[in-house]
Image: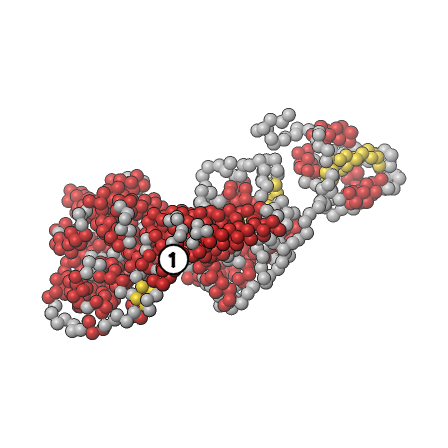
Amino acid sequence: MEIISRHQLLTISIIYQIGTTIIFGFAAGAGRDSWLAVLISTFFGTVLVWMYTRITHLNPGLTFIECYPAQFGKVIGTPIAWLHPLLFLYIAGRIVADIKSLVPTTILPGTPPWVILLFFMVVISYGLFLGIEVMGKLAEIILPIILLIFLIEVILIISSGVVHLENLTPILDKGWGRIWSVVWPLGIIQSFGESLALALVWTLMNERARVGRTMILSSLFAGLFIAFTDAMAVVVFGEEIFKRATYPLYALVQAISVSDFIAQLDATGVIYFCFMAFLKTYIYLFATIRSIQKLTYARRSRVFIFPVVSIAFVLGMTMAPNVVEHIAVVQKVIPYDPLYLSLMMVFPFLLFCVSWIRQKNKTQQN
Amino acid sequence: MVQRGQLEHHFDYILSGNATEDLMNFKTIFNHCIDIKYREFYINDVKKGSLIFLNGMVNTKTIDLDIMKQLMDCEENLFKEPELLAEDIKNIVHNKLIYSSQMCWVELFQEIVEHILSGNVALLLDGLKEVLVISAKDWDKRAIDEPATEAVIRGPREGFQETLSTNISLIRRRLKTSLLKMEEMKVGKLSNTEIVITYLEGIVNENLILEVKNRLERIEIDAVLESGYIEELIEDHSFSLFPQVLITERPDRVVGNLLEGKVGIIIDNTPFVIIVPGTFFQLLQSPEDYYQRYFVASSIRFLRLLSVVLSLLLPSLYIALTTYHQEMIPTMLLISIAAARETVPFPAFVEAFVMEVAFESLREAGVRLPRPVGQAVSIVGGLVIGQAAVEAGIVSSPLVIVVSMTGIASFIFPSFQLGLAFRFLRFPMMIAAATFGLYGILMMVLLLLMHMLSIRSFGVPYLTPLAPLRISGLKDVLVRVSWLKQSSNKSEKNKQQMGKPFIRHRQGKYK
């Protein structure tokens, strides 16, 4: 059995939760108040993540998806549990589609997308083959590097002379309405609700009692990080461009220009994104494989690697005919999708209540 | 003739006590071995005896003066008493006659043969069913020299040489404690090579020693000519490009590592000692880091890390930037690169690939040739061909700069083995860069990192202490913190750093 340390879980979670928002931006609909929207989402998101960790805490020894059959009974619980690998696989397919839409249009215009994705999937399969422990160590090494590069990026942006702090004011001039509209439900689902996939990693941690604290820490850190980058983008571009850009934070990297020498760093931004997408896809596929393994009572998980990776590849290739549709679906359809909402909020909430009441009854009987 | 497969000789002879008969048996075994010498003689005209030894591996002066002269000059009546028992003969020879500090009585034929073959003198005496084995080993050996592969500016200039006993003494001189243990083993069906496992008791993890012994015992091989054989047979991942043990010629480096709780394996007939477990960052350290002022040493470590990255990525970054991401190059630089590349008929990848192959072959040629010729090769190859190729417009001058910088960076590796791995990895990197640009480099780096993170050497993760992260261990990896700031001594610190090695028993046989 592979085991990861607390520090490794923390770094995996931070990278995972920052994830692809490093390019796509977060809560752009709230305009110049997006940073505030991110902070509010972070608050509710952290509560949601905390609830997930409590559920696994109340059902010791079981992974998150196994709790459904255990608490709701086989008839209701098993179908719900089976929905999870499908959801994870679908989201993994979306990230693969992100790569497909971003990489060929920005840095590799002549290369056919399927070759790029094939290489991506091969690297992910190798990672899945080696196991989560290796990924934990990888995250441990890469996170400091990412933060360092980010720090350099911030310094370079400031020295490029494009920062206009007045872009942030007036705060809340259009009221709370647009903030709430991005916080609920997209803000909470994105990054925080998606941490559901991490729940399948928690049982592999060596100090299981500290999962909750670790996850809260990483959620807060990721939230602050995203809020900061959003504020940065608004400060540089102003509200209108920020709202309309497809990749607002990618544009941020493009804005860097220091005395004509350090300029046009777009490619580094894409590379940045590719790594984030890599880890996120990895975690989703890992979660998919692990849930299938748990639900089929299979002994070895490696047999599932090839089929699952192939499905994600095909999903990514066929997900959306063009970038505009792809992004529009992410922003306008998915958040209101009943499956998303029920799997990420309604069912976990019910599960939490049931587990909590059962636990209480048990202690009272004793 | 002895068939292959029956290579191990087992003799069922038993010593008879009759010197003539026993000598005949030895002569049958050592048939057609001209380097085995026999010397028959009589003591006091009555007692027949003979000496058997390996010519060239013994000191004849010792044999003449301390053995022969003593036996033949002894008092007239010493052996003339008629009722002399075997015990008494042994006593007389052992206590009164032979001048030697190292000798023993051996009964088993097999053992006697082994002793003779390793350079000891066997003394057969009439009436004894045992043979006295006397040490008179002496053969020509190289003087202790400065190690050729690991030169330092400051530090001891002694290096190991090919004789096991000398190498052991070089280590012992640096650690005058009874806690320094040396255990002997023999490996190789034909070569019977002596191997010494050395460690510091109390510092080393017991399981590690057991595992090392276990792996050495499982080796099945005919002969061991160099420590490379052993290395390959005991490492965890023999398919990996990365060296997983530390190879060194320097006694001070071995001792430094023993103090960190590692185990040394000294092998006869080679100056290269193996240290296990070997980790990546250990292979990037030079013993000199600990002798120079720590601030300077730390900056040199950073320089080395930078060189590792450069030697791996520089040519592929050049290819990726000039082929796919020209916009990232500052405009003025881009113009000068483009101007230089204007006459070049090849794409950047072909250009870089050809130059890298040329550089690697130059380097290999320089190693094999005698030194004066080697210099000529580097002048002709490096200067003349490089200059001519640029002027002829076959390669561009920026590329020559890139290739030379990569070359210099790859010379910085303190471990030649690790340098080899990176030299090789440069080529797949270049192919990935030519196909996918920066994206390809990222994916290759991820593959490489994942591989390095997955391998272990004797249970210790290869990238310890960076991943899994141990802050205390980092004090001795990225920088070299002053001795005053490190925990009280080296051994304490490294106990924490190594943690509990998780020993993985490798399945299957070593063949």
Indicate the position of residue B404 as horizontal and vertical percent values. Answer: 48, 55
Q: Which residue is drawn at the image coordinates 30% and 39% (left, top)?
A: A303
Q: Secondary structure at mark 1?
A: helix
Mark 1 — residue? Answer: B339
**Residue B372 image position (x, y, % from top left):** 62, 51
Residue B377 percent coordinates (x, y): 56, 50
Q: Chain of mark 1?
A: B
Q: Nearer the viewer, residue B316 or B108?
A: B316
Q: By what rule are the colours in the image chosen?
A: secondary structure
| Quadrant (top left/top right/bottom left/bottom right) for the N terminus of chain B | top right
Residue B243 rendering spot, x and y as whole percentages:
48, 48
Along the horizontal axis of the image, is A82 left or right of B441? left
Residue sitting nearer the eye, A243 or B68:
A243
Q: Residues within 10 Å of mark 1 (few under 14, many from 20)?
A: few
User: Can see residue B495?
Assistant: no
Is residue B6 placed above or below A232 in the rendered structure? above
Taking the view exactly as shown, the residue that stands out farthest to the top is: B1
Which kind of residue does numbered mark 1 sit on?
Ala
Asked whether A243 or B21 is in front, the reply is: A243
**Is B50 or B39 nearer to us in this picture?**
B39
Name the residue: 58% across, 28% down. B4
Describe residue B144's horizontal placement relative to residue B242 as left or right. right
From this viewpoint, which residue is outermost toward the right? B76
Q: Is residue B504 left or right of residue B228?
A: left
Q: Residue at x 19, y 71 (%)?
A: A167
Q: Is residue A142 visible?
A: yes
Q: Which image quadrant is residue A78 in?
A: top left
